[in-house]
């Protein structure tokens, strides 16, 4: 029952929901690039302009790859690893007070939940309705044809 169409739709819907935050955030950073680079410089990032570009690439391209189910396991690991320093540096609620502390604690916990979803993708793949599955079906049918034609 693992490959049933219902599970495929659940995986597709999960990828859609998981990818939205990265796509929206990536576009937001792209359209406010100089502000993002300035904020990173203010946090002490070396080469803040390059760091902003890397963040945009990971969020935007990673989100689109997860949405399409393309190189999903690798992409999930890349985005997961990106979220570790991002979460610790920007949502360090333990160093804050009042409402800012509570807000950033929620953001840290949200990122941990997203990271859990990314680990599930890294472990299980994109599901039936994905470019990964489509490529696998294509390569399997090529192997079957080749094996059938072999002397």
Image (tube, rainbow, N blue to C red):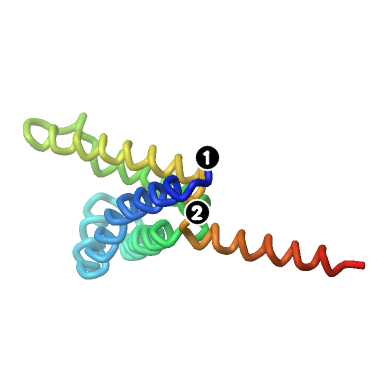
Taking the spot 41% from the left edge, 48% from the top edge, the residue there is: 11
Q: Which mark is residue 128?
A: 2
Q: CA distance from mark 2 to mark 1?
A: 12 Å
What residue is disc 1 on?
1
For numbered disc 2, what is the local secondary structure?
A: loop
Q: Quadrant of the C terminus?
A: bottom right
Q: Does 12 sit above or below residue 91?
A: below
Tell whether label 1 touches label 2 (CB within 8 Å).
no
Image location (x, y in percent) of residue 42: 22, 54
Taking the spot 13% from the left edge, 32% from the top edge, the residue there is: 102
For numbered disc 1, what is the local secondary structure?
A: loop
Q: Does 134 sit above or below residue 98?
A: below
Name of the residue lying farthest toward the left? 98
- Residue situated in front as seen by the camera: 145 or 74: 145
- Residue situated in front as seen by the camera: 11 or 44: 11
Lateral position of residue 75 relative to residue 147, left or right: left
Disc 2 or 1, which lies upstream in sequence? 1
| Closer mark to the observer between disc 2 and disc 1 | 1
């Amino acid at each position: 029952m693992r490959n049933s169409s219902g599970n495929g739709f659940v995986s597709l819907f999960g990828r859609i929901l998981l990818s939205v935050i990265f796509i929206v955030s990536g576009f937001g950073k792209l359209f406010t690039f100089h502000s993002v680079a300035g904020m990173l410089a203010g946090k002490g990032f070396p080469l803040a302009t390059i760091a902003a570009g890397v963040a945009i690439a990971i969020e935007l391209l990673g989100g689109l790859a997860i949405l399409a189910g393309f190189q999903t396991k690798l992409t999930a690991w890349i985005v997961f690893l990106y979220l570790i320093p991002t979460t610790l540096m920007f949502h360090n609620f333990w160093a804050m007070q009042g409402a800012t502390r509570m807000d950033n604690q929620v953001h840290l916990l949200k990122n941990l939940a997203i990271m859990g979803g990314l680990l599930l993708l890294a472990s299980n793949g994109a599901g039936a309705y994905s470019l990964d599955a489509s490529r696998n079906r294509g390569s399997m049918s090529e192997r079957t044809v080749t094996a059938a034609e072999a002397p």
